[in-house]
């Protein structure tokens, strides 16, 4: 009579391989979900910062200096920029994320600016904001 021990060992090895394969698939899925969650969080926060900048810019009639005093950042010519670190806190140095506002040419009595937020080597959010210019006889 032959022993059935080798068959039991082979069965356990196969079960262990199936378990290891399932664990590897689950770990890969968790890593993908974490990466996707982080990317979506950054896109959401980028859009919130772009919306804040748009509202401040509109309320100040396109005055970049006044907008920078309220929200922070630096104005250089016709551009306003804010840098953020990994935790979305403003920083003076080049950070992980950057919000840039630049004016675009438009028709008379209307001003338009393009707001972009980039990070991780890609564009995370983009908005175009417009407002009506106040003329001397209106104000």
Image: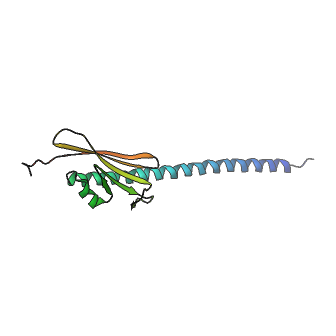
Q: Which residue extends farthest front? A: 77
Q: Which residue extends farthest right? A: 1
At 38% from the left and 54% from the top, the residue drawn is 45
At 24% from the left and 44% from the top, the residue drawn is 112
At 27% from the left and 51% from the top, the residue drawn is 54
Q: Which residue extends farthest top? A: 107
Is residue 30 shown left or right of residue 88? right
Q: How many marks?
A: 0
Q: Is residue 104 above or below residue 51?
A: above
At 34% from the left and 53% from the top, the residue drawn is 81
Residue 96 position by quadrant: bottom left
Is residue 91 shown left or right of residue 110? right
Residue 138, horizontal then vertical, whole percent: 8, 49
Viewer-closest of 3 and 38: 38
Residue 52 position by quadrant: bottom left
Q: How is the image coloured?
A: rainbow
Viewer-closest of 16 and 109: 109
Viewer-closest of 48 and 9: 48
Residue 94 position by quadrant: bottom left
Residue 26, horizontal then vertical, whole percent: 60, 50
């Amino acid at each position: 009579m032959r022993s059935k021990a080798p068959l039991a060992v082979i069965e356990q090895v196969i079960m262990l391989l199936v378990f290891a394969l399932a664990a590897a698939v689950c770990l890969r899925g968790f890593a993908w979900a974490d990466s996707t969650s982080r990317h979506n969080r950054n896109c959401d926060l980028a859009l919130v910062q772009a919306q804040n900048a748009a509202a401040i810019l509109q309320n100040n009639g396109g005055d970049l200096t006044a907008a920078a005093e309220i929200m922070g950042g630096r104005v250089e010519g016709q551009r306003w920029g804010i840098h953020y670190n990994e935790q979305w806190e403003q920083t003076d140095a080049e950070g992980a994320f950057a919000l840039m506002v630049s004016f675009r040419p438009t028709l008379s009595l209307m001003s338009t600016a393009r707001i972009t937020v980039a990070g991780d080597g890609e564009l995370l959010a983009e908005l175009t904001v417009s407002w009506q210019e106040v003329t001397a006889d209106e104000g």
